[in-house]
Image (tube, helix red, strand yellow):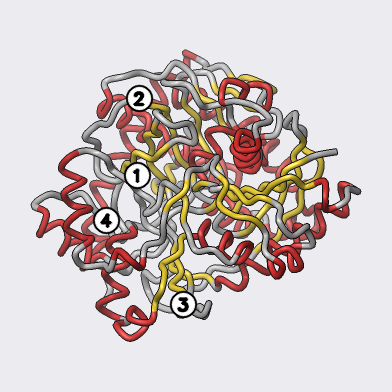
Amino acid sequence: MKCIAAYDFGTSGVKAALVSEEGELLAVREKSYPLLKPRPLYVEQNPDDFWEAVCEVTHQAVADAKIDPSEVSGLSFSVQSVTFTPVAADGTILYNAISWLDGRAEKQAEEINERCGMPIVRSQDYQSRLLWFKENEPDLYDKTAAFLDCDGFLQWKSTGVMKVAKDYPGIMKNHPAIQEYIDVTSADIDPDKLPPMVQACEKYGVLDKKGASELGLCEGTPVFGGMVDVPAAAAGCGCVNNGDAHLYLGSSGWLSAMIDDVYETSEGSYQLNSIEPGLMIYGGCTNSCCLMLNWAIDHFYAKEHEEMGGKVFDLINEEVAKVPAGSDGLIATPWLFGEQFPIADPFVRASFFNISENHTRAHFMRAVMECICYSLRGQVELYRKDTGKDLKEVGANGGGSLSDPWMQMMADVLQMPVNIPDEPRHSGAIGAAFAAAVGLGWCGFQDVKQFVKTKKTFTPDPELAELYDKRYDTFMKFYESVKTLSYDINQEE
């Protein structure tokens, strides 16, 4: 049976999926890796952890599917965005991968914005961090042959070739003023250190002898251009046509909406290339989605999690379903690692507000779920403001979409239907596999619905619209009340 090895490479771990020509999931394996936080605002990862995890889960998935490695017809990576690793010409990794969660480059972002005369780059953008690296690690910068995004790093380990996906350097804001900014910053960063680009469905290279051996696959197997997580998750949720939208609920969370034009957008938003040429993706990232949920589980359900394992989610769903909408006035915020969108602030942090003696752990869990819904509603509201267009429904995928109570909250907060695909937890990998399938000539873009089918739909309760309008307003006002205090507490010394 011919299949594709597709990888969904997130903040906290990687999933390897073997996907058939028809989009059927044959096997999935997962492996986690740690975040490193050596200093305030610094978030890094060990690139060797990335590759070791990819190799381990590939061996396991092939064994689980009981296929011969020769049946793997291609590889495709979906990766975390805005994470880069400096690599020397001889292949030496010169520095840890600087994570997309990292906020160290605030000073460089301010410098770039001042030079450009407009606030269009943040500390989380590649350009700010590359400038930070040049200014703070000049010797390593000189030794760097290529700054590889996560996709480019994995593909280099697979093929020995240094290129990057077409949407590099991550957040591409394509209108004339932004192009000027890109041109200006390129004067600071040697363009030779930014490798050539390839399209998501384009053949990147083939597995070399070393890569094939370590992965347990066959030398010469095609490796496709791949993509960052947003377009992969969009495709894996059937979001490919102009106006289609989806919400992703993984370690981070985001809105993505397909657009056929370029807009001047709110701070923190992005306009990425879609896997389909001619269309782009409007979106923005909530830094902590299931990261925040998992934090709450670790603190409110630690004993049950240890005893019940994954079944703890059934208990949580049962308990939060009994808490009234609005969590009896308890408000949470999800900003464990600062925020990008709809709020752009690396210093703000998570919190609970308006706690009373009547609140139980189930109230805290529901408040966490609701606050992530509010954050994603903020992204929908900014999409409407920036594009002048509306959304009638959204798809949802990622691990968070497996919770029925949470997805009902999402529909109620957004006041629109929320559709869940057959494999919501693995749709990033399925989207990556779809791109490779197009590259192999197995199908065309018009065939995405054959890969992605709707499993269930959550319909909003109109009687909750007024309540959640008020709670959403409170959520946004709360940020305005605490942002100065958050900066005073968390700014780097």
Question: Which residue is found at the position 75% from the left and 28% from the top?
Answer: 22
Amino acid type, residue under disc 2 in the picture: Asp
Instruction: Write down the residue under mark 2.
Output: 260
In the image, 335 versus 60, the foreground residue is: 60
Task: Answer with the quarter of the image where residue 486 lies.
Answer: bottom left
Labels 2 and 3: the sequence-earlier one: 3
Q: Disc 2 to disc 3, how far (Cα)?
A: 39 Å
Left or right, 442 with respect to 43, comes to right
Q: Nearer the viewer, mark 3 or mark 4?
A: 3
Instruction: Write down the residue under mark 3.
Output: 89
Give me the disc on residue 122. 4
Give me the disc on residue 180. none
SS under mark 4 = loop
- Viewport quadrant of the C terminus: bottom left
Task: Answer with the quarter of the image where residue 366 lies.
Answer: top right
Q: Where is residue 33 in the image (x, y as percent from the top left)?
A: 63, 66
For the residues bearing labels 2 and 3, Cβ distance under 8 angstroms? no
SS under mark 2 = loop
Amino acid type, residue under disc 3 in the picture: Ala
Count residues near mark 2 (Cα–Cα under 10 Å), then give few for <14, some for 14-19, many for 20+.
few
Q: Where is residue 373 in the image (x, y as percent from the top left)?
A: 47, 35
Q: Disc 3 to disc 1, how far (Cα)?
A: 36 Å
Question: Which residue is found at the position 33% from the left and 29% from the top?
Answer: 383
Give me the disc on residue 341. 1
SS under mark 3 = loop
Residue found at the far front of this picture: 220
Q: Disc 1 to disc 2, how far (Cα)?
A: 22 Å
Question: Which residue is found at the position 51% from the left and 59% from the top?
Answer: 152
